[in-house]
Image: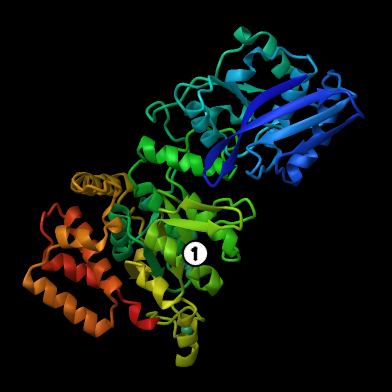
Amino acid sequence: MLARVWSASILGINAIQVGVEVDVAGGLPGIVVVGLPDMAVQESKERVKAALKNSGYAFPMRKIVVNLTPADLRKEGPSFDLPISVGILAASEQVDPQLLGDHLFLGEVSLDGGLRPVAGVLPIAATAIKMGIKGMIVPFENAAEAAVVAGLKVYGLRSLIEVGDFLAHPDRYAPTPTQTDLTAHTTKEIKLDLKDVKGQNHARRALEIAAAGGHNLIFVGPPGSGKTLLARRLPSILPPMSFKEALEVTQIHSVAGLLRGKGLVIDRPFRSPHHSASGPALVGGGSFPKPGEISLATHGILFLDELTEFKRDVLEFLRQPLEDGYVSISRTRQSVTFPAQFTLVASTNPCQCGYYGDTIQPCTCSPKQREQYWARLSGPLMDRIDLQVHVSRLQPEEITSHREGEASDRVRSRVEVARKIQQERFRQDEIGNINSNAQMQSRHLRHWCLLDDASRLMIEAAIRRLGLSARASDRILKVSRTIADLAGEPNIQITHVAEAIQYRTFDRMT
Ligand SMILES: Nc1ncnc2c1ncn2[C@@H]1O[C@H](COP(=O)(O)OP(=O)(O)OP(=O)(O)O)[C@@H](O)[C@H]1O
Ligand SMILES: [Mg+2]
Ligand SMILES: [Zn+2]
């Protein structure tokens, strides 16, 4: 007998419908899987056989052919275990096939018949709706992420036995409640607060500007000056994500298999990969491409601590995504695009010994050594960092002081006001895909960043003095716009431009 079960496969961050056809017929006992399966799908045969037997079902001692359609799409991973199992059960008349037409099945099975979570369930749920699917049967740990899609009944089950029972008595099972807004969910994570930071007003101001306009930032300073301390507090002053942003982030994290039983991701991502991270780990890769850190950081922060320790060729990969907001990965059979709309925050010492420019400890590096040190950071990368901030060591009286710094809540309320001004501004733009000043293109600058003569002269002088590129000077304009927004000024003024220029202190050094 022939049975057909619906499932889906992931391509990039999207899902493609897959039909799993199972034929059980006379012939020599055995099971073959056709339709471009990868190794994990091939191994599914063994898992399914053991799982069915250990769940008390009969494994048909006949010829079983499993065909995955469409035939030209490569099928990856263990998520077809469940649809193949259900197909075999239906084709051998051990379960009721009635629900198979409008339900979708997805999940890995373990040898004892338990269901194990798989990656990419959220985009598959979104595709299921478009396929006209009514209900989706997934491993219990994947139910919450599937349930952020409205209009789909999601059943999170724990074993093949439960799946068989569900197919016989669907009315005994309640679907997982859907989660289609942010209101019911407050974050439990306690964020690091800026009030723990003493002094460092210059660096705190830069963090506020970065948060308000989505600008890239680097802290440069001696060991122990508080660079890491400061950077880790940026999430506490970012505005909350919209539902749309949360959905996009959840989709990427779903494909990467990072949700682990959670539903919607509501906190802005803060990703801090170690400096030993490889190119593919950072930008994405693999034969079935998976998103890397830059995509996981979408709508949030990518924090590269100790930037000069990262391999230079790995950093080079960041250049294009920083410009475009996405990354494309090409493979012989397919090419996929992942979003990569993140704010880059980096930190580094000013030189090998760490003390160049310090007020107390002398730098022991030679000029040659300092030059080599800065050469590790590529000029084009620094060019894309809008806020380059020197963090000096605290003064002795600042260290011993017990005064708390301004709390994150208060800073965030100013950031939110500046973000509202930007949203209002870009709502009028026909593209409508811009959320912050940092994402403005050149044509927007002509529109939104008009300068008076004095400001223009000041930028021209800076270009000459610092040898700035056209990109760097565009970035000065964007930062000026954010500083003006924080000040509630409709027009950019010379003081805003002056402040923006002083955040380009390190262009010279690369
Ligand atoms: N401004 C500050 N306010 C309060 N504590 C501080 C401050 N700066 C540094 N500290 C203390 O010093 C510790 C070291 O700071 P942090 O790790 O941020 O330094 P760093 O600049 O990242 O140094 P490195 O270059 O060695 O990585 C912090 O954990 C904190 O205890
Ligand atoms: Mg540090
Ligand atoms: Zn030095």
Task: Please provide percent x and percent y for residue 443.
Answer: 21, 61
Does residue 199 appear to the left or right of 228 in the view shown?
Answer: left
Task: Please provide percent x and percent y for residue 324.
Answer: 38, 59
Write the residue at 44% across / 41% down: 248
Write the residue at 43% across / 65% down: 320
Q: Quadrant of the C terminus?
A: bottom left
Check disc 1 and report its element: helix, strand or loop. loop
Instruction: Give the residue at the far left of this rendering.
Output: 453
Question: Can residue 109 be spotted in the picture?
Answer: no
Does residue 415 appear to the left or right of 300 in the view shown?
Answer: left
Q: Does mark 1's beta carbon lie closer than 8 Å to ligand 2?
A: yes
- Mark 1: few/some/many CA within 10 Å (<14, 14-19, 20+): many
State whether residue 289 is above or below residue 473.
above
**Considering depth in this image, is 208 or 314 the residue closer to the camera?**
314
Question: Can residue 402 be spotted in the picture?
Answer: yes
Residue 441 sits in quarter: bottom left
Instruction: Give the residue at the far right of this rendering.
Output: 28
Q: Which residue is mark 1?
A: 305
Task: Please provide percent x and percent y for residue 504.
Answer: 30, 73
Write the residue at 30% across / 48% down: 433
Does residue 139 appear to the left or right of 399 in the view shown?
Answer: right
**Considering depth in this image, is 232 or 419 the residue closer to the camera?**
419
**Considering depth in this image, is 192 or 424 the residue closer to the camera?**
424
Question: For the residue marked with disc 1, what is the amino acid?
Answer: Asp
Residue 203 sits in quarter: bottom left
Q: Quadrant of the N terminus?
A: top right
